[in-house]
Image: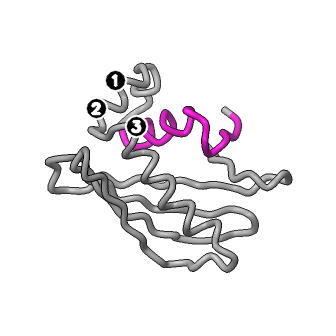
Amino acid sequence: MGAVDDTDIGLVLLLAVAMTAGSQSQAKSLSKIVASVGLTPEDFDLLNATARTLYEAPSPPVGRIVSWSNPDSGSHGRVRLAAMRGNCAYLQHFVYAKGQTQPRELRSQRCKAADGRWLLQP
């Protein structure tokens, strides 16, 4: 699978797959994956917007953690910029869907393309 534009719906699918165990989750429909994670599409939008503030900064602050919260869904989380290597940002996400007391952790990587877009890498 190639890189996915950060604003593409494929991002939601890739993040959801990363949060679920095993390759069997790849066969699930998008709605089932999102439902199994417990996050809404708006939660994913907030998660991504928060992450973007880290890696799009002029001097990305490695190690910095920022939080997001969706009062409508009750979900919240934190995003940490784990590393910057070349034109790629490595992110660590800790996500609490509504009612969860333990976070679900996922890691993602986004690399800046020649045209300036940040693309999610598989």
What is the x, y in percent for residue 71?
Answer: 25, 53
Label 3: which residue?
41
Residue located beneath label 2 in the image: 36
Residue 82 at x, y = what percent?
A: 52, 70
Residue range (magenta): 2-20
Query: Mark 1 Cα within 10 Å, few/some/many (few <14, many 20+)?
Result: few
Q: Earlier in the sequence, mark 1 or mark 3?
A: 1
Residue 52: x %, y % from top left? 57, 60
Residue at the spot x=30%, y=38% of the render? 37
* Mark 2 residue type: Ser
Residue 102 image-quadrant placement: bottom left
Given this view, does label 1 or label 3 mark the residue nearer the observer? 3
Query: Which numbered tag is attached to residue 81?
Result: none
Q: Would you say the residues marked 2 and 1 are in contact, meaning their CB atoms lie under 8 Å apart?
A: yes
Residue type indicated by callout 1? Lys
Q: Residue at x 84, y 51 (%)?
A: 115
Label 2, secondary structure: give it: helix
Mark 2 and mark 3 lie on one chain; the one further toward the N terminus is 2
Foreground label between 2 and 3 = 3
